[in-house]
Image (cartoon, grey):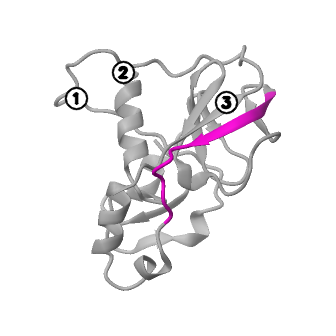
Amino acid sequence: MKAGLLFFLCVFSIGSHAVIKRHDVPAENYLLNDAPEYLIDLPHEGHGVLIHEQWVVTVAHTIFYDYRGKELKIGLNHYQIENVFIHPEFKKPSKSLLSGDLAPLMSFLKARSDIALIKLSSPVSNVQPVSLYKNTNEAGKVITVFGKGATGDGLKGEVLETKSSNSKMG
């Protein structure tokens, strides 16, 4: 099921910087051999989703500097970034939230507008954008969320050594 809307709501509303796995499920169960072509690697770190022939959506916390003029590899071709639009209400957490009790940080992450749009200078011609989910019967359905980044579980937390891994998770 290509539940594009649910994909965006799940991926872009979560403030985690890690792919969280269950401690009782083998790690290899989370690895994909082939991620969808519409899952796009960004220049520095992170990824986005091709949602239209000229637009990629991502979380704002993966935009580390001015990406204008940088290239994204989409399918077999490279496309130049024309502009990046970060939600005007996006805020980075203060250093005080990054240590001690994590409850205030979790509240902060849930409340921020962590979304950005990347406009490409030319339309993508070799990859289909993700399909937009237009139905209203999503309650109780199983979805697949794709991500990339450090992995961890609820027992040990984030494993920083896995952050630079190029494997995509499903």
> What is the crowding at mark 2: few (fewer than 14 residues within 10 Å), some, or many (at least 20)?
few
Assess whether mark 3 and mark 2 are in contact (beta carbons under 8 angstroms). Answer: no
Look at label 2 and name its amino acid: Met
* Eye-nearest disc, 3 or 1: 3
Q: Viewer-proximal residue, 17 or 23?
A: 17
Q: In the rendering, at what x and y percent does residue 137 appear?
A: 19, 20
Residue 1 found in image quarter: top left
Q: In the rendering, at what x and y percent does residue 107 appear?
A: 29, 64
Q: In the rendering, at what x and y percent does residue 97 appear?
A: 41, 77
The C terminus - image quarter: top left
Whether residue 80 is in magenta: the answer is: yes
Numbered disc 2: secondary structure: loop
Left or right of residue 136: residue 129:
right
Q: Tell me: residue 71, above or below residue 130.
A: below
Q: Viewer-proximal residue, 89 or 117?
A: 89
Residue bearing the label numbered 2: 1
Residue bearing the label numbered 1: 141
Q: Residue at x 36, y 70 (%)?
A: 105
Label placed on residue 119:
3
